[in-house]
Structures are given as C-alpha cells and as structure tokens.
Amino acid sequence: MVFSTNIFIFWFLPIVLLLYYLSPGLKVKNIVLLFVSLFFYFWGEAELIVLMIGSCLMNYFVGLWIHSSKSKKLALFTGLILNLGLLSYFKYADFFIRNLNRVIPDDKALEFLNIALPIGISFFTFQSISYLVDLYKGNVEVQKDPIKLSLYISLFPQLVAGPIVRYHDVAKDLLKREHSLELFNSGVKRFIIGLSKKVLIANVMALLADEIMGRPTGELNSYVAWIGIIAYSLQIYFDFSGYSDMAIGLGRMFGFRFLENFNFPYIARSIQDFWRRWHISLSSWFRDYLYIPLGGNRGSQARVYFNLTVVFFLTGMWHGASWSFIVWGLFHGFFLIVERLGFHKILNKLGVFSHIYTLLIVMLAWVFFRIEHIDDALAYIGLLFGFGSQTILAFQPNNEQWFIMIIGIFFSLNGLSLIEKLNAKTIRLERYNALSEILGSIGLLFLFFFCVMALSSNAYNPFIYYRF
C-alpha cells in the first residue's frame, strides 16, 4: 500500500485515525499503531511480514544485549552483521552472483536466487542500525518495551519511503506525546502538499521522462534529451520530497515530529551544499555512522578523499543493486573532492553560475540514476552535448506537460518564497498573515480535489521506491 492511492486516503487512513483516537491511553495507542503498521506492510509484502517482525525482535534483543553485556563491542558487531546480512541477502545477492558469473567459467556459473526484495528494507535496516550504534555509544537509553521498539522500526508513515528516522529523534514521542488540533491540522496540510507534489507534478513528469528516456538514444536529439532529463529531475525531486512531506504530515497526525528531509536542493550553490539539502536524513546518516567513524575530515587529505569515496560508493549502492547507481554515487563523490581541492573558492565568486554548475552536475548524475545500463547512460549524456544521433524527432510535450514542467521548475527553485516576500511588503503584516491563511486553506482544498480526481482516473502513478 502506498500513500498516493484512494484506498489509503479514504479507507486505511480514516479507519486508523478513528481506531487511534478512540484508544484509551498512550500504551493502547502504541499497540494500535504497531498492528496497523504491520498490516500496512503485510498489504504489500504479505509473504515477507515475518521478516519485518523478525527484524523488530532481533534488534530488540540485540539492544538488550548491548545494554547488559560487558562485551558491548561483540554485541554491536553481531547486530550490525545480522542487519547488514539481511540487507545484503535480500537486496544484493543476485547482484553479487551476476558479477561473479562474469569472471568464472560458464560451466561453473551460479544460479540466481531470484529473491523478492522487501520494500523499504534499506530504510528500516538503517533505522535499526542507528538505534544499536547510538545505544552502544550511550546516546540513547535502551528500549525495554518490545512494543515501542517495534513501533519505531515499523511505523507506517516512514516505513517504505523514509525519511530515515533516528531513535533519539522519536524516543520521547514513544514514551509521551501530545496531540493537538493545531498539530493535526498542520499534518493534514503537509500531507496534502506532499500528495500534490507526487500526484500533480511527479507523476506527470514521470510519464514524460519515461516516454523520452525509455527510448533508444538513436531515436532522440539533444533538444528532446534535455527535456527528458529536466522532466526526470523534477520527477525524482517531487516524488522523493512529496513522500517525505506525506510522512511528516502523517507523523504529526499521530503526535510524532519527524525532521525535515528536503530543503530546496536545486537552489544549491555547490555539490556539497546540494547534499546538505537533498535527502537530509540519508546524507546525515552516512555522515554520522560511516564518514565520521572512518575519520571524517581528520587526517591527511588523501584519507579524507578516501573516506568520501567510500561513503559515496555505498550511498550509490544503497539506492539499488546496480553499477549505474554506484556510478551515480561516485560521480557526486568526485565533484565533492574537486570542490574540496579548492574549486569551492571559485564557486563562491561565481554568483548565479555556481547554481548553474550545480544543476548541471546533478542532472548529468541523474542520467545514471535513471538509465540502468552505463553504456546507454553515457550515450544519453553524449546526446545532451550534441554527440551521437541527431535525428529529427517529431515529438513535443503536450500542453499539460509544458505547464507542469514550468510549475515544477518554479516551485523546485523556491519561487513561492519570492511571492511571499513581495506580498508581505505590499500588505500590512497582520492582514497578510490572515489572508494567506485563508487563501492557503482554500488552495489546499483545491489541490486535494485535483489529486483525488487524478487518482480516480487511473492516471500514471509509479512507485519508484521498489529498489530501496
């Protein structure tokens, strides 16, 4: 089950909210949330629900072991091996077999396991690891209630599409959380914003991107190729940030306060700045649990560059079991190293051109993220710069796609803040706040109506988290 469906919006969510708020006391509320979260996962991964329950219990007992054992390192190491072992088996086993078969004789080739990938396994595995590591370091208290820890790992708003929520960020909410009409209202608004990003922008751009980037490069020219990568850049931003917005909004409806996950990454002035703004929960996770333990910025320059290379190699691999994802990660890592070598000083003097540089690098990297085979991705990049086929293709986006692309560019570059600043200057502040609140509520109702209409018409609604 995914958020951007009518069955979730009109059946699952209302029933869950009713059960939750009719439940007496936080203990019963937590139990209700746990069972509906497991049901949410069961709906899409019926045969793998045992894995989810097993992961919850495994990390609960390993956490108790770390807390009570004198051999805390051994307990932590065991927990890491178990979590990473499950992730590697389900997500990377066939990837390793495929690459191993390339270097061994055909008569000794291994058979693929064809393992079903549990949706969201990368998210809940990283959450479990953060709990165990923070517990080992003494940054959090051990959770002795299996219900609360299982709820943390399986909580449905962020289960299959993130953000990666760390235990210390919700530990207090698991023990005691406040519910208010104001918080619930802000959650509903945030959910509608995220749903609109996904349904009204990302889905339209996805159809355009698939129509272009799914074709052989021999059928494209530079003009169409640029339209394709711009559409995909908008698709992936509004899809990822839209799901994060929906998760944050749903969390607020149940009294949880998840941290922000996207901060207008397309206005970044460097790749380093981009990663401060893009998928913040993921980049900060790799920073705190991998980059810093490897040595971070300490040591020689060569060591720092090695650390960055390892981090972005694994960042790429985290997104999917494919060399194209690894190339995507290393591509970002390379330009981070270039900036650290001194290019950041030049970027600081370039003004608007630093934004153009960042957007260009990010969009070129998205080609590897979107196109599975590296040779095809390189051919597409060549086409962007006028190399390869330049066929005359009688293709144009339709009027809706042009309109949504313009809207997407405007909002991805935080154009709304400019309008708000202009309005605040021309209207008295108290009048502006009241007017913006009324117009904002009306606008959200219209957006929700359009989303429901789009979903009811069986419009294109891809789920791009299946590799995670």
Image: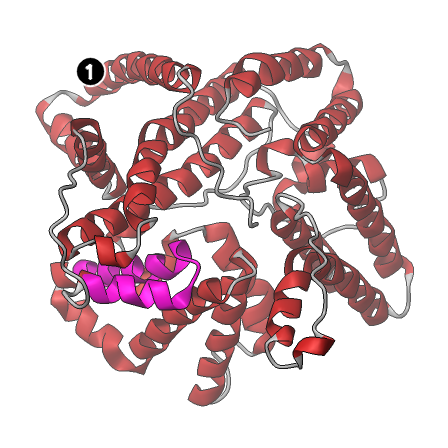
Q: Position of residue 138 (x, y in %)?
A: 73, 60
Residue at label 1?
431
Q: Is residue 269 visible?
A: no
* Residue in front for this viewpoint, 467 or 148: 467
- Residue located at (17% from left, 34% from top): 402
**Magenta residues (range):** 355-383
In the image as oriented, which residue stretches furthest toward the left? 426
Find numbered disc 1 in the image and state the secondary structure of the residue it sits on: helix
Q: Amino acid at mark 1?
A: Arg
- Residue located at (23% from left, 61% from top): 360
The image quadrant of residue 301 is bottom left
* Residue in front for this viewpoint, 274 or 435: 274
- Residue located at (21% from left, 41% from top): 409
The image's colour scheme reads secondary structure
Q: Position of residue 269 (x, y in %)?
A: 24, 60
In the image as oriented, which residue stretches furthest toward the front? 107
- 39 vs 383, left or right, is right
Classify the position of the N terminus by image quarter: top right
Q: Position of residue 377 (x, y in %)?
A: 34, 63
